[in-house]
Amino acid sequence: MYNKINKYKREIIMKRKISILGSTGSIGRQALEVIEKLQDKFEIIALSAGSNTDLLNEQIKKFKPKYACASDMNAISGAIPITLNDICSNKENDIILVAVSGKIGLRPTITAINNGIDIALANKETLVMAGDIVMPLAKEKGVKIIPVDSEHCAIHQCIKDIAQVDRLIITASGGPFLHKTVNDMRNATVEQALAHPRWNMGKKITVDSATLMNKGLEVIEAHHLFNMDYDRIKVVVHPQSVVHSAIEYIDGSVIAQLGIPSMHIPIQYAITYPERFEGIKSKSFSFSEVARLDFEEPNWDKFKALNLAYEAGRLGGSATVCLNASNEEAVFEFLDGKIKLFDIINVVEYMMSKHTVIKNPNIDEIFEIDNEIRLKTREKLQKTMV
């Protein structure tokens, strides 16, 4: 009995060992805020950043990870510089939060899975580009992939038995142009596109939210995460962003996850799963303060990106690589003020129409296709800007 009690006490005080890829980005910074609140529950093994080494070094000083990674390894101070691959090969980790943006997150995620390390996934490209590879590999290795996106996190919390689920219902705020005209969107400035009414996110994902491409990418993610046919994944616009998503069971019951619009909540759920702790909570949820919840169908004519994402998802293979790469390149040009908001979708549609789908590309082929699409997209964008 005494030994059982001691074992229980050791399990209670044992800290979960975590590394954060992309610690200086929006998700990474909020994850560190969560961990600071739950500092007795976590030990940070490694942090990684891109070029923002000043902030990374501040984080190293505060959270004291043993290892760190940055684009300029020589600029790292206070931790041992190692590569992303080394971080994800370190079996000290209980879980790795993949919060880098772009395709850079794919190979480290696969490395972590091959090493049996659970993943809190906040990187869309990993599943959009290679979901057919990543999810079967995770199943083979017995690795949990816990989604960080608020929508997928909501669905994850609602599901008890995926075999009894009839539909996934993914909510979308509608972004800053929900009730604006097509002309308003056509002439939108960068500042207007970045003025999201509910969420505080990075620039690229905020522009994707303005076009609803982000929701399309989330549909593709949901397909892979929950092994659900595209015909059984529905998008509904919900401006208040209180219902983060829902599922409909085969008996007609609908289960939804609600909460205030805060990324701290899904981040904490993902990195502490299956446990829950008090953590960061600015205030308790109040139905009376919410007062009303509105829902409507997406305007498919105005938000063509959503159609394109469904089309790419149903085509499968390299079609989703084409969708993601061309969109990302176009968004960067929009953020630089070189093209209009509607040009993003027009370019993506053009690139998809010219792309010959490869059905089952391997990882190397995925990166080759990605590079090829980006090059061709930039060429197309140059003509658009002339």
Image: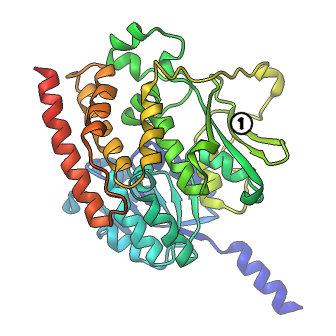
Amino acid type of disc 1?
Gly
Q: Is residue 35 visible?
A: yes
SS at mark 1 in the image: loop
Display colour scheme: rainbow
| Residue beneath the point at 16% across and 32% down | 380
- Can residue 66 be seen from the camera position used here? no
Q: Residues within 10 Å of mark 1 (few under 14, many from 20)?
A: some
- Residue shown at the point (79%, 19%) measured from the top left: 291
- In the image, 268 versus 220, the foreground residue is 220
Query: Is residue 352 shown above or below 241?
Result: below
Q: Nearer the viewer, residue 222 or 317?
A: 317
> Which residue is pictured at 69% across the width and 44% down the height?
167
Q: Considering only vertical position in the picture, is 244 above or below 362?
A: above
Residue at 39 percent across and 52 percent down: it is: 100
At which x and y percent is residue 330?
A: 27, 32
Q: Tell me where residue 360 appears, x and y as whole percent.
A: 37, 63
Query: In the rendered view, would you say 305 is above or below 352?
Result: above
Residue 288, position as x, y percentages in the image: 83, 22
Residue 64 appears in which quarter of the rendering?
A: bottom left
Q: Is residue 104 above or below residue 230?
A: below
Q: Quadrant of the C terminus?
A: top left
| Residue that numbered label 1 is attached to | 259
Report the side of 277 relative to 235 (left or right).
Answer: right
Instruction: Decide which of 192, 276 is in the foreground and name it.
Output: 192
Where residue 350 appears, as percent x and y from the top left, is 27, 32
Residue at the far right in the pictured view? 1
From the viewer's perspective, tell me whether residue 39 is left or right of residue 49: right
